Amino acid sequence: MATVLANRAAQNQTTGLLRLSFNFFRNLSTSTSTEKPGASSSASKKPKRKKKKNLFEVAQFLPNWGLGYHMAKTHWTDVSYQITKINLYKDGRHGKAWGVVHKDGAPAADAPKKISGVHKRCWRYIPHLSKPGDTTPTLMKPTENAPKAEAELA
């Protein structure tokens, strides 16, 4: 019986050494990965960068999808577009847009043109320029000239 116990103890020692060698190789292979152990903890402490918006993502929060409002790319200085027309695709984040170019707050062109780069993530709303509600359209009041012209014809 003593020999049986001695044989089992010898087998346990050899399997224990074999397990230790496998664990050593496993640890060695996982420690050679490209990610540093301290990198994941420092990345979680950093605040996440805010995702910039394309023209349609900015316009969706404005009344009437931003028609009449001024928008510009973040790196432009003193240049903006007054949005006149928007064609949206079904998802609401893509499409085409037209507008009148404004330089230093004054219109630089008479006719609207297609805005390029509307899908780039660098658009912002320009709040200090005129809004559609600020400008009141000039309504022509009916004058008495029209009835006089009819009376002269008769």
Image (cartoon, rainbow, N blue to C red):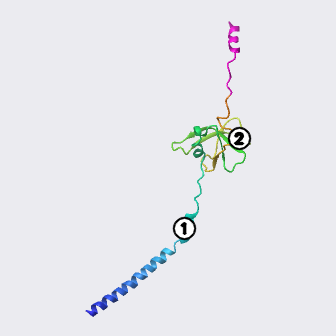
Q: Amino acid at mark 1?
A: Ser
Q: Quadrant of the N terminus?
A: bottom left
Residue underneath mark 2: 102
Q: Secondary structure at mark 1?
A: helix
Q: Earlier in the sequence, mark 2 or mark 1?
A: 1
Using the rendered image of the protein, determine whether residue 36 is visible from the camera's viewpoint.
Answer: no
Image location of residue 142, percent across then percent down: 67, 18
Magenta-highlighted residues: 138-154
In this rendering, which labeled residue sits more in front, label 2 or label 1?
1
**Residue found at the far left of this picture:** 1
**Residue found at the far bottom of this picture:** 2
Q: Is 97 positioned to the left or the right of 103 in the image?
A: left
Q: Within 10 angstroms of label 2, few (less than 14), some, or many (20 or more) residues?
A: some
Task: Decide which of 78, 45 is in the foreground and name it.
Answer: 45
Using the rendered image of the protein, determine whether residue 82 is visible from the camera's viewpoint.
Answer: yes
Image location of residue 26, percent across then percent down: 45, 77
Q: Amino acid at mark 2?
A: His
Q: Residue at x 39, y 83 (%)?
A: 18
Task: Decide which of 38, 109 is in the foreground and name it.
Answer: 38
Q: Secondary structure at mark 2?
A: strand
Image location of residue 122, percent across then percent down: 63, 50
Asked whether the beta carbons under mark 2 and mark 1 sit within 8 Å of each other, the answer is no
Q: Residue at x 38, y 84 (%)?
A: 16
Label at residue 41: 1
**Residue found at the far top of this picture:** 154
Q: Residue at x 69, y 17 (%)?
A: 143
Q: Is 111 positioned to the left or the right of 41 in the image?
A: right
